[in-house]
Image: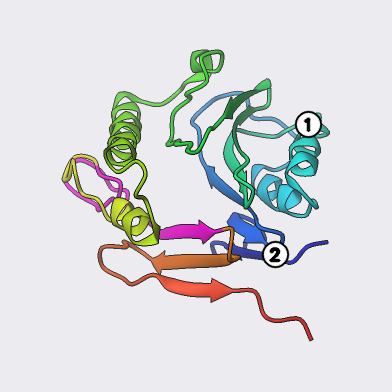
Amino acid sequence: KPRIMMLVPAGQISFMGMNELGMSTACNFLPCTGWKTGFPRYLLSRYMLEQKDFDQACLSLERINSIASSRNILLADHKGHMVNYEILPVGVGEIHGNGSLIHTNHFVHPEMAKYEKSNPYEMEDSLVRYQRFTELSEDNKGKIDLALIQAFLRDHGDHPCYSICMHPSLHNTYRTMASLVFDLTDRVMYVAAGNPCQSRYQKYTFEMQP
């Protein structure tokens, strides 16, 4: 299997990361009901990264016939392929990107919107972040590089109510746990622990094979 490099909370064996073949998975939670016994959501991203290429990773997800709970996974590779899966125990919404693909914590696929269970605050928070990132991407189309992506992830455009770089406030108790950027061409992962406006991005690479 390909080597995998991931950011994981303590005690977990899978979360968000990339493999040495230049493929990455970014994940987030989608509020929903209907949880059941099945393949655990945290292992989905690792299972996909254990595949040899983008098409195999997509097929690996299709082969799972019983998923325990909701998960959103954005799969991308160094060739520019990208797809987002809004995954529920009752079905999957598939969204394809063309040069860019943005997702936050609400359902975007029109056929999946009926399963939305976010409360009003969660929904507005997710929509604001989605719209803000879309705005930043469109305003900088054609000139986006590593430094600019990191700047997007430090953005406080709608603070203190909502922001991409999230801090606890009178309106919420959430905060950014970590910020990641994957360079799939050079097989490099940049990680800022906590809020990226308060910490530097550190560079992580795969160790050279003996």
Q: Position of residue 187 (x, y in %)?
A: 60, 65
* Callouts 1 and 2 close, C-beta under 8 Å: no
Q: Amino acid at mark 2?
A: Glu
Q: Residues within 10 Å of mark 1 (few under 14, many from 20)?
A: few
Q: Position of residue 117 (x, y in %)?
A: 45, 23
Residue at the image point whose x is 23% and y is 40% from the top: 162
Q: Amino acid at mark 1?
A: Glu
Is residue 169 in the magenta section? yes
Tell me the magenta residue range. Answer: 163-183
Q: How far apart are labels 1 and 2 at the CA level?
A: 23 Å
Is any part of residue 38 visible from this angle? no
Position of 201 compared to 49: left or right?
A: left
Q: Main secondary structure of the magenta part?
A: loop
Q: Any mark on residue 171, and which? A: none
Q: Position of residue 194 (x, y in %)?
A: 36, 64
Direction bottom: furthest residue: 210
Residue tagged 1: 62
Residue tagged 2: 20
Position of 68 compared to 145: left or right?
A: right
